[in-house]
Image: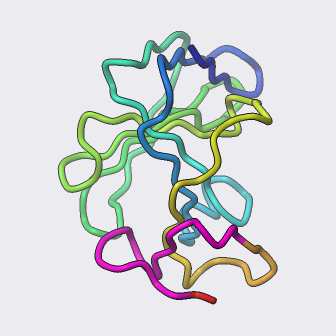
C-alpha cells in the first residue's frame, strides 16, 4: 500500500500495489501545473485507489482533445491526482509521484513531449522517449 498526500496532509490517497505506469511528461501544461520542468505521474487502476479528504476540481482539454480532471487540495493547492476521459487512460488514476514522498518510488517507464524537455535534464538510456504523446515508435533523442 502506498500513501500520497498533499502538502498540508488534508487530501490523501491510498494506492494498492505497484503503479501500472510511471510517466515523465515535459509538456508545457505539465510544467505550468507543477511549477517544475516536468510532471512525474504514477498510474494506478481506479479500483486500487481510495480517496480521503476535501478536494476541488480543475478541468481542461488534453492535447489530443480529451478532458483531463485535476483534483487538488482546497487548503494548500497541491494537485494530488488526475483522471482522463476516453482517449487517455480510462479506468486509471494518475497520481503525482512527489506526493508519495518516497525516494524508493519506481523510476519513470517512459518520457513524453521530449520536444519540450529542458536540455539540461538527462534521462537513463533505457527509458523510451516520445517527441509528442506516447504512441508509435520512441524517438531517438541520443
21 over 131 or under it: above or below: above
1 over 134 or under it: above or below: above
Residue shown at the point (72%, 16%) measured from the top left: 9
User: Does the magenta-highlighted stretch encompass residue 113?
Assistant: no
Q: Is residue 79 left or right of residue 93?
A: right
Q: Position of residue 59 (x, y in %)?
A: 38, 47
User: Does the magenta-highlighted stretch encompass residue 135?
Assistant: yes
Residue in the foreground of this view, choosing between 115 and 11: 115
Quarter containing the C terminus: bottom right
Q: Position of residue 39 (x, y in %)?
A: 61, 55
Residue shown at the point (33%, 36%) measured from the top left: 92
Q: Residue furthest front?
A: 126
97 over 50 or under it: above or below: below
The range drawn in magenta is: 123-140
Please identify the quarter of the rendering in which residue 126 is found. bottom right
Chief SS of the magenta region: loop
44 over 112 or under it: above or below: above
Q: Is residue 47 left or right of residue 127?
A: left
Quarter containing the N terminus: top right
Q: Position of residue 26 (x, y in %)?
A: 58, 69
Residue in the foreground of this view, choosing between 91 and 127: 127
Q: Is residue 120 left or right of residue 138?
A: right
Q: Position of residue 74 (x, y in %)?
A: 61, 26
Q: Is residue 117 left or right of residue 69?
A: right
Residue shown at the point (48%, 34%) measured from the top left: 19
Amino acid at each position: 500500500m502506498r500513501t500520497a498526500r498533499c502538502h498540508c496532509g488534508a487530501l490523501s490517497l491510498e494506492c494498492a500495489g505497484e503503479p501500472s505506469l510511471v510517466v515523465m511528461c515535459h509538456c508545457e501544461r505539465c510544467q505550468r501545473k507543477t511549477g517544475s520542468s516536468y510532471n512525474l505521474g504514477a498510474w494506478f487502476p481506479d479500483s486500487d485507489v481510495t480517496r480521503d479528504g476535501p478536494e476541488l476540481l480543475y478541468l481542461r482539454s488534453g492535447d489530443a482533445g480529451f478532458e483531463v480532471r485535476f483534483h487538488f487540495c482546497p487548503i494548500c493547492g497541491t494537485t494530488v491526482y488526475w483522471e482522463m476521459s476516453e482517449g487517455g487512460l480510462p479506468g486509471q488514476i494518475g497520481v503525482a509521484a512527489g506526493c508519495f514522498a518516497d525516494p524508493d518510488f519506481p523510476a519513470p517507464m517512459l518520457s513524453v513531449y521530449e520536444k519540450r524537455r529542458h536540455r539540461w535534464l538527462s534521462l537513463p538510456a533505457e527509458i523510451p522517449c516520445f517527441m509528442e504523446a506516447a504512441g508509435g515508435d520512441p524517438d531517438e533523442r541520443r
